[in-house]
Amino acid sequence: MTEVEYELLLDVVRTAIAPEPRTDREIALMPRLFSLSVTSPKAANDNETCWPLIPFPDGWHAAC
């Protein structure tokens, strides 16, 4: 592949992944859309109590 072909390929890729221009209305709605998703979803099994810490028995180990 020559350097010219490589540059043409890069131009095609840049054009394909370039973001679409946004309208003023879309830009105005952006902060509102992001503010709606700030609250984290609540788990389906959340009973709002703290679970006690139950230590592993001696000799047991855990890894994440």
Image (cartoon, helix red, strand yellow):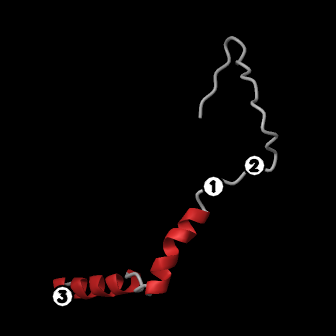
Measure the C-alpha gap from mark 3 to mark 2. Answer: 55 Å
Which mark lies nearer to you, 3 or 2? 2
Relative horizontal placement of residue 37, taking residue 26 as reference (left or right): right
Residue at position x 80%, y 50% from top? 44
Specify few, some or many for label 3: CA neighbours under 10 Å numbering under 14, 14-19, or 20 or more. Answer: few
Which mark lies nearer to you, 1 or 2? 1
> What is the secondary structure assignment of the residue under circle 1?
loop
Report the label total: 3
Q: Amino acid at mark 1?
A: Thr
Q: Amino acid at mark 2?
A: Ala
In front: 63, or 39?
39
Q: Is residue 58 above or below residue 26?
A: above
Residue at position x 68%, y 18% from top? 60
Q: Quadrant of residue 54?
A: top right
> What is the secondary structure assignment of the residue under circle 2?
loop
Specify few, some or many for label 1: CA neighbours under 10 Å numbering under 14, 14-19, or 20 or more. Answer: few
Relative horizontal placement of residue 39, taking residue 14 as reference (left or right): right
The residue pinned by badge 3 equals 4
Measure the C-alpha gap from mark 1 to mark 3. Answer: 50 Å
Among numbered discs 1 and 3, the one appearing first in the sequence:
3
